[in-house]
Image: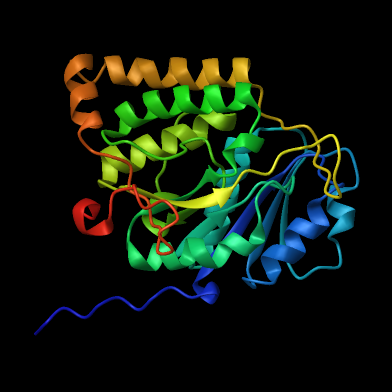
Amino acid sequence: MADVAPRPLSPDDIAIVIPALNEELRIRDVVEGALAHCPNVILIDDGSDDGTVERVADLPITVLRHTHRMGKGAGLRDGFAEAMRRGFHGVISMDGDGQHSAADIPRLLEAANAYPGHIVIGARLRKRARQPMHRRIANDFGDWGIAIGCGFRIADTQSGQRFYPAPVCALGDIPGEDFVYEAQLLISASRQLGVRCVSIPIESRYQADTGPVKFRKSHFRPLRDLWRITSHVVAQVLGAGSLPEQYRRTRAIPPLIHDPTGEFAAAPSRATQAS
């Protein structure tokens, strides 16, 4: 009997997980935007001391609360665990500060269905000139190290807007806290499950001096957090064998980008990269 293709994922099959710390400025817009595309939203309040939770108290979502700040890694762990407990087939993660557009949720899900079993990353490739230079340099450096840890190149390893298939959400004992956890999750998924990453182009959204949309200052601190990520990843890379050999192997596998519009036509096509 021929294998039956898996049923495509729908918004009912997944959960949106939103870690939040002191996000009263934008959290209601973020949650309402997510609800417009998916009925299953899990908000993890990481010990906020402002009105974050009160701003969404009347919305039909699940709220998990930390009594004190535990970091983004702990928030994602708890959100994944809740999503798996409720039987969802995958999770889309979004930050609570509004820098991720809910309008990209259908595109993440579409890419997840085009590439079953892959992690899908919302790569900040559109309007990159808006990204602060120090953030761009930090992201590019992080991409280099995490790619070697995974064994293949990835467009934007630092983006927090991602789709994770259920087997990745169910991985236990992932080391690292805060932003290190997100980097380690890519490496562990690759090494333990053989999971590849595919990126979709999204827009960079950052605080501007003028304009109608305001964002709070990012919790990401380039020097501190990049050092934590880099030192964590380098230790694993050095323990995995010859660095030059790992580098050559990684460079031979270009980043996989799902781009049906042809906006980034120079990116590798699925036909050459879907292995």
Q: Total of numbered circles in the picture? A: 0
Q: Residue 234, image x and y in percent?
A: 37, 16
- Asked if 165 appears above or below 188 in the picture, the reply is below
In the image, taking residue 150 as reference, residue 227 lies left or right, namely: right
Give the quarter of the image for residue 240.
top left
> Which residue appears at 76% of the width and 65% of the height?
32
- Asked if 139 appears above or below 53 in the picture, the reply is above
Give the quarter of the image for residue 263.
bottom left
Question: Is residue 262 visible in the rendered structure shown here?
Answer: yes
> Which residue appears at 66% of the width and 51% of the height?
18
Q: How is the image coloured?
A: rainbow
Give 46 or 27, whichever is nearer the viewer: 27
- Residue at the outermost bottom position: 1
> Which residue appears at 34% of the width and 31% of the height?
147
Give 207 or 21, whichever is nearer the viewer: 207
In the image, taking residue 207 as reference, residue 138 lies left or right, namely: left
Q: Residue 170, image x and y in percent?
A: 42, 51
- Asked if 253 appears above or below 37 in the picture, the reply is above
The N terminus - image quarter: bottom left
In the image, taking residue 39 as reference, residue 13 lies left or right, namely: left
- Residue at the outermost left position: 1
Q: Residue 171, image x and y in percent?
A: 39, 46
Give the quarter of the image for residue 21.
top right
> Which residue appears at 40% of the width and 22% of the height?
233
Question: Is residue 174 visible in the rendered structure shown here?
Answer: no
